[in-house]
Amino acid sequence: QVQLVESGGGSVQPGGSLRLSCTTSESIFNPMGWYRQAPGKEREMVATISSGGNRNYADSVKGRFAISRDNAKKTVFLQMSSLKPEDTAVYYCFTRTQAGQSWGQGTQVTVSS
C-alpha cells in the first residue's frame, strides 16, 4: 500500500512563506506533485515533478512556488513564497505508480491577515 506522509502546512500572513513536505513509501522517481482544494472549489493541480525531474506549475503559482525533491530522503518539497489569500486550501501530495494515483492525507494552508 502506497503511503504518503505530508507535513508543513499552517497559517501565514499574505506575503509569507511555507514549505510543504511529502515523503513517499515508493520510489521517489515516480511522478509526484501537489494539488490543492479550496472550500467549494474543485481540486486543482499546483505543481508536479516527473520521473526525469521536469517541473510543471499552475499559472497562478508560477514564479512564487517551487517544487523539488530529495532523492535520499524520498521526499518532495513545495516551497511557497509570496503567499496570497487565494492560496488558502488543503494541499494534497500525490504519486503515480503502476497501481495508479495515490494521495496523501492533505495539509491545510491558510493565508490571512
Image: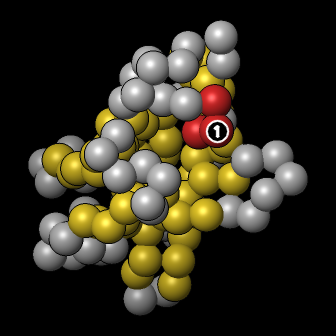
Total marks placed: 1
- From the viewer's perspective, tell me whether residue 29 is left or right of residue 77: left
Give the percent coordinates (x, y) of residue 7. 48, 33
Q: Position of residue 30 (x, y in %)?
A: 30, 74
Residue 20 in which image quadrant? top left
Secondary structure of the residue carrying numbered label 1: helix
Q: Quadrant of the C terminus?
A: top right
Position of 28 with respect to 113 (left or right) is: left
Which residue is rendered at x = 41% and y = 28% of the image? 82
Identify which amino acid the numbered label 1 is placed on.
Glu
Compared across the picture, whether 72 is left or right of 87 comes to left
Locate residue 111: give its quadrant.
Answer: top right
Identify the residue at horizontal 75%, vertical 64% (top origin): 42
The single residue placed furthest to the bottom in the displayed view is 98
The colouring scheme, among rainbow, by chain, secondary structure or one colour, is: secondary structure
Q: Of residues 107 and 57, which is closer to you in this image?
A: 57
Residue under the image location 48 percent in, 53 percent down: 60
- Residue with the mark numbered 1: 86
> Vertically, is 71 above or below 86?
below
Q: Residues within 10 Å of mark 1 (few under 14, many from 20)?
A: few
Residue 91 image offset from top left, x and y in percent: 58, 46
Q: Which residue occupies 59% across, 39% down? A: 87
Front residue of 84/30: it is 84
Residue 85 x, y percent position in the rendering = 63, 30
Residue 86 appears in the picture as rendered: yes
Would residue 29 be visible to someone looking at this image?
no
Residue 64 image-quadrant placement: top left
**Residue 60 position (above or below residue 80):** below
